[in-house]
Amino acid sequence: MIGWRRQCFRGHRLAASRVKAKKPIKEGYAIVQTGGKQYKVSPGETIDVAHLPATEGSTIELDQVLLVAGGKKVRLGTPTVKGAKVIAEVIGDGKGEKVIVFKYKPKVRYRRMKGHRQSYTRLAIKEIVC
C-alpha cells in the first residue's frame, strides 16, 4: 500500500504531464449554450441565437461548451468541457416571424390583439477549439 502523501502527489504529477495543446476540430460537432438555449454546431454552419450585443463582422467566443465530439472521441463536460470554446463570426442581426397574441372573452366585447417579433443574432461557426 502506498502512503497517503505519495498517493496524493502521484496523481498531481500525472495530470501535469498529460497537458496537451488545444487543437481546432475540423470534423465533428459541439453542443453550446447561449441565451438559455442549447445548439448543436459544426464548423461552417450558421445559427440564429438570442440577440447578442456584438457588431457585425466581429468574432465571438462561446465558452459554455457542454459536449465536443470529433471522430470517434467524445468529451462530455460536467457541466462544461474545460478549455473548450467555439469561435464564431457575427453575420448580422434580424427579427423572427411575427407572433400574434389574441385575448378574447365571450359576451363582454373584450378583444385585445398584440404582435411580437423576437430579435436574434446570426452567427457563422468558424472553428471548435478543444
Image (cartoon, rainbow, N blue to C red):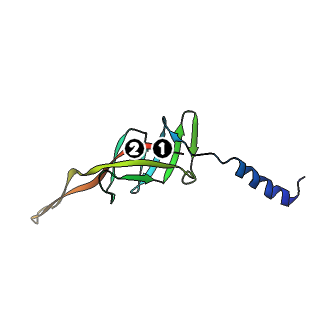
Kind of residue indicated by mark 2: Ile
Q: Residue at x 31, y 50 (%)?
A: 57
Residue 31, position in %: x, y? 47, 46
Q: Which residue is outermost to the right?
A: 1
- State whether residue 26 is above or below residue 117: above
Task: Name the secondary structure under disc 2.
Answer: strand
Q: Position of residue 65 (x, y in %)?
A: 49, 50
Q: Position of residue 28 (x, y in %)?
A: 49, 36
Q: Residue 62's mark?
A: none
- Secondary structure of the residue carrying tag 1 is strand
The residue wearing badge 1 is 128
Task: Tell me the kind of residue under disc 1.
Answer: Ile
Q: Is residue 25 left or right of residue 107?
A: right
Q: Are circles 1 and 2 on residues that touch, CB within 8 Å?
A: yes
Q: Is residue 54 left or right of residue 81?
A: left
The residue at the point 33 percent across, 60 percent down is 53
**What crowding class fits label 2: few (fewer than 14 Cα within 10 Å), some (14-19), or many (20 or more)?**
many
- Left or right of 109? Residue 17 is right
